[in-house]
């Protein structure tokens, strides 16, 4: 048994729980730093899918990495063993591309396929998500 969660947290810390937005921001910054170098310095598992249907093409990429040794919130979140990132790029007909980014915390370092399946809900788990738009050139 393990836990997989995405971030439905507000971007402004609440008085009742100021840690959750900090966790999200920490994970966003961690992946942003590594994406600048095309993940060259990061050990990770990745999984890609490509789907066509209903006039839309979806390309999804999932990345999962172990919590880094120097992760600043390790003490507050001791059960978190891995963090994940997913990117979905969609094309609806001849319209513009859109993309969606989600960040995850996971209590186990799952296989790449299992992580992708869990994120997609293929195994029946409901996952709430923080959707972050991204620019497509």
Image (spheres, helix red, strand yellow):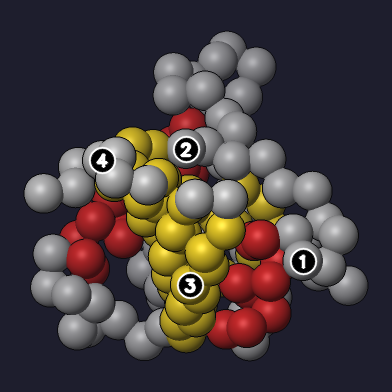
Q: Residues within 10 Å of mark 2 (few under 14, many from 20)?
A: some
Does residue 79 appear in the picture of this structure? no
Query: Whole-percent x and y of residue 52?
Result: 52, 64
Among numbered discs 3 and 2, the one appearing first in the sequence: 3
Instruction: Give the residue number, with chain letter if any, for mark 4.
Output: 96
Q: Quadrant of the N terminus?
A: bottom right
- Identify the secondary structure beneath mark 4: loop
Instruction: Give the residue number, with chain letter if any, for mark 3.
Output: 50
Q: CA distance from mark 3 to mark 4?
A: 18 Å
| Front label number (2 vs 1) | 1
Does residue 23 appear in the picture of this structure? yes
Q: Residues within 10 Å of mark 3 (few under 14, many from 20)?
A: few
| Front label number (3 vs 1) | 3
Instruction: Give the residue number, with chain letter if any, for mark 2.
Output: 131
Q: CA distance from mark 3 to mark 2?
A: 20 Å
- Identify the secondary structure beneath mark 2: loop
């Amino acid at each position: 048994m393990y836990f997989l969660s995405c971030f439905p947290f507000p971007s402004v810390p609440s008085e009742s729980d100021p840690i959750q937005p900090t966790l999200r921001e920490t994970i966003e910054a961690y992946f942003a730093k590594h994406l600048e170098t095309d993940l060259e310095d990061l050990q990770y598992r990745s999984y890609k899918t490509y789907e066509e249907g209903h006039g839309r093409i979806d390309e999804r990429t999932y990345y999962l990495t172990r919590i880094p040794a120097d992760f600043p919130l390790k003490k507050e979140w001791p059960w978190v063993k891995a963090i994940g990132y997913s990117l979905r790029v969609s094309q609806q007909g001849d319209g513009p591309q859109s993309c969606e980014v989600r960040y995850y915390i996971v209590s186990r370092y799952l296989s790449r396929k299992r992580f992708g399946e869990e994120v997609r809900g293929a195994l029946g788990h409901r996952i709430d998500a923080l959707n972050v738009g991204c620019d497509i050139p």
